[in-house]
Amino acid sequence: MVKIKPFKGIRPPRELAKEVASRPYDVLNSAEAKAEAGEKSLLHIIKPEIDFEPMIDEHSTQAYDHAVANFKKWKANGWLVQDDEKCYYVYAQTMEGRTQYGLVAACHFEDYVAGRIKKHELTRPDKEEDRMIHVWRQEANIEPVFFAYPARGEVDAIIDRVVTTREPVYDFVAEGDGFGHRFWVIDEEGVIARLTELFAEVPALYVADGHHRTAAAARVGAEKKEALLDAGGTYTGEEEFNYFLAVIFPDNQLKIIDYNRVVRDLNGLTPEELVAALDKDFVVTRHGTEIYRPAELHDFSMYLNGEWYGLRAREGRYDDADPIGVLDVTILSTLVLDRLLGIRDLRTDKRIDFVGGIRGLGELQRRVDSGEMAVAFALYPVSMQQLIDIADTGNIMPPKTTWFEPKLRSGLVIHSLKD
């Protein structure tokens, strides 16, 4: 059963929340972050390279040092202020009329080590190391991870009472994407105690978004534990460094959107040869210039040579009893990307790129029409149940399978490893 706790959040004053809050570090490149960052934006802390002209390497010692200096500056200027008491928080996000309510809490790294916080993706060592350095140097989890849990009626009822009986401390619509963000503080001892008890009955949490941040936070917790014991200190398991920042959403409120693929060349095939080769494993339907969106599992769309095609996987080409084999990303990778286009490693092959569904299928068409890419494939989204089944069976999804939207805003609350 999982362990969560309240914490003394470091967060912006009400009037500065919109200015401080930012998109996560990994959805913007350095140039985009530099263009987007206002004076008080958290981007100066999570992407500190943007403060230099010309911009420096984001993984350099100078960048890490500057991130630490900026975090201290934000606190000294009163742009980030620590709460006096340990609290839970509620974070609500609204996108296209749909709202999801997450509990902001501190999670224990031992739950990740023991497999009670379950992952569905592999991490890259370089990205994990980068996030670990940030946490270690800042002595804080600056950005939250995004978890899901099997919905519990009593937790839903508690959160509903919070959001319906009091005003949020933050309430704003983010510029650019137009998504709404609201935030409440839970500081009543009885409510805090009950939420802690209820989550002690939850068998597992699931990493939805933030695998590298989760792995990095767990490494910091384990290494600080080891350092304390090596120094002859007394370890209780309740030291603040054991915990890291998460927003935990009930699984029935979350929506995964499509994560699509674009490929630079046809591996020596002509467009006509590729279409003919696809007929072996797919029922191929030509849709002309009108965008075609997959309507169900095992249904794909392809944009090639100015036209859209529907690709329906033929019976016998996949195994519905295999939690990995049944995934559309697996079907596409095996029957098309590998067999026909020669792309065998999605993590390293430079001929393929990935496009989150939030950008729309028009983005796939644009990248092919521009000549940058030769062909694009759109997939039907993975379901939350598929994600949970894969995590529960200890399997790992292929790279770039899930895209959750909306993304968490960073900077609404920070967790200190010191107190």
Image (tube, rainbow, N blue to C red):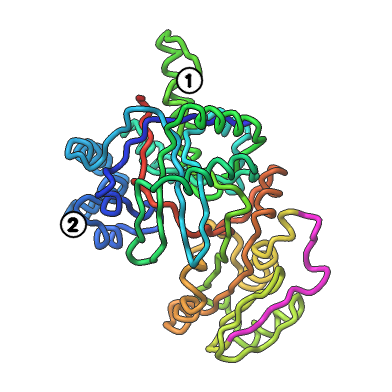
Against 266, residue 395 (above or below) is: above
Q: Is residue 203 magenta?
A: no
Amino acid type indicated by mark 2: Pro
Farthest front residue in view: 165
**Image quarter of residue 282:** bottom right
Taking the image as shown, residue 143 lies to the left or right of residue 388, namely: left
Q: Which residue is mark 1?
A: 238
Residue 310 forms part of the magenta stretch:
yes
Q: Marks 1/2: CA distance?
A: 43 Å
Residue at figure coordinates x 41%, y 37% from the top left? 132
In the rendering, which numbered label is found on residue 107?
none
Against 205, residue 396 (above or below) is below
- Quarter of the figure that contains the N terminus: top right
Circle 1 Cα neighbour tier, 10 Å, few/some/many (<14 / 14–19 / ≥20): few
Task: Say which residue label 2 marks.
Answer: 54
Count the marks. 2
The C terminus lies in quadrant: top left
Label 1: which secondary element: loop
Q: Is residue 122 visible?
A: no
Tell me where residue 197 sits by quadrant. Answer: top right
Query: Which residue sits furthest bottom?
Result: 288
Q: Which residue is depicted at the point 43% across and 77% down? A: 372
Given this view, does label 1 or label 2 mark the residue nearer the observer? Answer: 1
Check disc 1 and give the amino acid type.
Glu
The stretch of residues the image draws in magenta is 308-322
Residue 79, image x, y percentages: 22, 43
Q: In the displayed structure, does residue 348 sit left or right of residue 169?
A: right
Q: Nearer the viewer, residue 92 or 355?
A: 92
Q: Earlier in the sequence, mark 1 or mark 2?
A: 2
